Amino acid sequence: MGVNRKDLQLLVRLAEQGHIKPCSKIVEIGAQQLSNSFLRSEDLVRKAEAALGAPHPYPLPAPGPVVLAAGRVELQDSAAPFARSFWTSLGFDYAAIDVDGSPGSIPLDLNFDETPAGLRGKYDLVTNLGTTEHICNQLNAFKAIHDLAGSGAVMIHHLPAGGAPNHGLVNYNPKFFWHLARSNDYKWLYMDFLGGDEPYPVPENILEYVERYEPTAAKTMQGRKTADYAVQIALQKTLDIPFVPPLDVDSNARTDDAALNRRYWTVFQPGVLESVKRGGDMPKWVSETSADETGAEESGDLNDGWSETRLARPAGDISDEVRRALDRKVASASHEIRVAVTRAIADSEQNVRTSLDRKVSNSEEAIRKAIERKVSDSEESIRVEISRTASDVAGRLAGRRFVVFALVASALGAAILMAGFLAAARWLL
């Protein structure tokens, strides 16, 4: 694909945001050339120079001849200048991973080769601008990118995501990068999904192969069209951890398989990842997983680290193998114990929470009943006391009325008696 105008735009954006620093170390995955769209973008080249403090302006070569492919996509000119001179003009320390002997390239077969120890974590910017779609071994290719990137490094991918049926070996979808970032705790800096300008017929060579086996389908496909798509992504490496391949499972997925827990620990054991992110020590078995499992897989027996081919080896070699197998057994058992303890702690915490909830609920219910009982007793006592008081008051009032009546009656009786005496006295006199 080469470095094009869209890549320049992203470079300027990341530099202005401070994600790409001046005088950084860059490694290209595949020594790239400058496309015509790049060579026509002097405005962006000057912006990149300003953002990165380039020591001198880059003398832009003239664009090459225009050759359009299907969908009016402009093809890369085979004589286009290499990107090396542009990167060095910006002040970058430049390198490239390639097997074709391009200037400044490091011969590395991304299908098989490990990243040399002297290159691991060395680079601040890793660009994959149309290379890994040509690699069969995707795991090894993206592991190499991870290993080349230092802590805090930016990794830029600009790759085909649809159409282009005669280009490369694979097309990418965004989900691949979502899970790649999740597995390695990459930070997302940018994403774009680009569509082709014009649809075009399915290529004839593909229709010819289909026609050999499905003539009707080939005729149907002749009336249909396809279009090219691309995905452009920028990720930042935040943790210096061994590469973990992307895994197409839900984020809350879990497994009891010890080997899978070690291999995909960032996915299946998020608690361990969070501990490492907070500054905790990375478990020893994380760094040893890759080497141990590679040796076991090559032997054909990952479970016990032993195979028939080892029976023919000298005693010294067998002892070494036994020790390694025992080490793996111990590591596996230790891991299983940690998983069991973690699960037990989680279950205990849940039981404690449930018990506490039950105790609190029962206590609240007992308190409510006690309060209701107290209120009910208090109300009854108040009613009885009020009734007793009312009765006493009524009794007292009734007694007082009787005394008054008796006094009045006595007074009246005395008055009548006195009147009788006076009347009798008058009559006698």
Image (cartoon, helix red, strand yellow):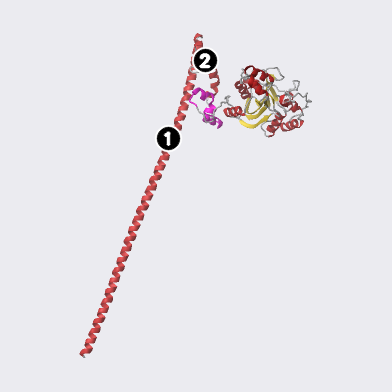
Q: Which residues are magenta?
A: 255-279
Residue at left 28%, top 73%? 405
Q: Which residue is mark 2?
A: 300
Residue at left 41%, top 42%? 361
Q: Residue furthest front?
A: 216
Q: Give amino acid for label 1.
A: Asn
Residue at left 34%, top 55%? 380
Circle 2 residues within 10 Å: few <14, some 14–19, many ≥20: some
Residue 221 appears in the picture as rendered = yes
Tag 2 secondary structure: loop
Q: Position of residue 384 (x, y in %)?
A: 32, 58
Q: Is residue 59 left or right of residue 354?
A: right
The N terminus lies in quadrant:
top right
Q: Is residue 324 left or right of residue 7?
A: left
Quadrant of the rendered structure where residue 89 is? top right
Q: Is residue 221 left or right of residue 63?
A: left
Q: Quick check: is 300 in the magenta stretch? A: no
Q: Residue furthest left?
A: 428
Q: Position of residue 253 (x, y in %)?
A: 52, 29
Q: Nearer the viewer, residue 205 or 303?
A: 205
Q: Give amino acid for label 2.
A: Gly
Quadrant of the rendered structure where residue 66 is? top right
Main SS category, magenta section: helix
Number of the label disc, if any, that sits on residue 351? 1
Q: Position of residue 50 (x, y in %)?
A: 74, 33
Q: Is residue 304 above or below residue 357?
A: above
Q: Is residue 359 above or below residue 173?
A: below
Number of the label disc, if any, that sits on residue 374? none
Q: Nearer the viewer, residue 298 or 321?
A: 298
Q: Position of residue 177 (x, y in %)?
A: 61, 28
